[in-house]
Amino acid sequence: DAKTTQPPSMDCAEGRAANLPCNHSTISGNEYVYWYRQIHSQGPQYIIHGLKNNETNEMASLIITEDRKSSTLILPHATLRDTAVYYCIVRVVVNDMRFGAGTRLTVKP
Amino acid sequence: DTEVTQTPKHLVMGMTNKKSLKCEQHMGHRAMYWYKQKAKKPPELMFVYSYEKLSINESVPSRFSPECPNSSLLNLHLHALQPEDSALYLCASSQDTAEFYGYTFGSGTRLTVV
């Protein structure tokens, strides 16, 4: 699986958009980009995934660059409940998902 | 039912005890997973079951013994653990690997070995 690089921590003001970057310069053509988050003392929660095209669901938007070497997870209107560790994972569709260090997002009032 | 249920939520056990963690899902998922998470670290994959057969064992010590009695249930049997095995143990499930819909995680069992 391709390696991912995320900033260790980020802050965001409540009500503003949170943009979480992820670099995956060694991604291969059949690898998807997945995002999960883990709120303190809970299990990780699936957010969104994509291959080439930008994706949007009720939780977030995923923007993947044309060369697929990086992506950005966008939480359009961050709330205090979005404070969590966000994991960007790149992998093919097999059942061995492994987590990197992630980004600790703190949403501040 | 869209949840993965883990029991117990908390467990304290001595180094000579035998205990089991239980994980249950009723979403029809055919892959189930055990992860271990130490404080302030990401989850680490331990075991993967696919169609009730063990498909991945990440070189986990034999004091951890997984079992998948049926497609809805996953157990982790614990014996002769060490204090360093204290961690949050997470169970997850997913659809058949041919299609991806995301993993569903339980809330975990917080294990303390004394």
Image (cartoon, rainbow, N blue to C red):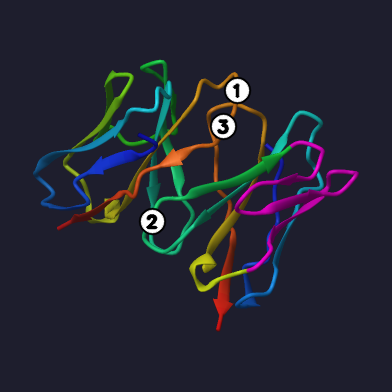
Residue A85 lies left or right of residue B32; in this view the side is right
Contact, CB < 8 Å: mark 1 with mark 3?
yes
Q: Is residue B21 within the magenta segment?
A: no
The residue at the far front in this view is A58
Q: In the picture shown, does residue A38 fall above or below A80?
A: above
Residues at marks 1 and 3 on the same chain:
yes
Judged from the image, the secondary structure of the residue bearing numbered disc 2 is loop
Image spot of residue A23 (x, y percent)? 76, 54
Asked which secondary structure carries label 3, the reply is: loop
- Quadrant in which the C terminus of chain A appears: bottom right
The amino acid type, in three-letter code, at marker 2 is Gln
Residue A55 shows in the view: yes
**Amino acid type of the residue tagged 3 in the rendering:** Tyr
Label 2 – label 1 distance at C-alpha? 26 Å
Q: Which residue is mark 1?
A: B99
Mark 2 crowd level (few <14, some 14–19, many ≥20, 10 Å Cα): some
How far is the residue under mark 1 from the one under mark 3? 7 Å
- Amino acid type for the residue under numbered disc 1: Glu
Q: CA distance from mark 2 to mark 3?
A: 20 Å
Numbered disc 1: secondary structure: loop
Determine which residue is flagged by label 2. Answer: A42
Tell me, yes or no, whether the two marked residues, 2 and 3, touch with CB atoms within 8 Å: no
Span of residues in magenta: A51-77
- Of marks 2 and 3, the one in the foreground: 3
Label 3 marks which chain's residue? B
| Callout 3 crowding tier (Cα within 10 Å): few <14, some 14–19, many ≥20 | few
> Residue at 86% across / 49% down in the picture?
A65
Kindly identify the residue that appears in the image at 14 percent across and 58 percent down: B114
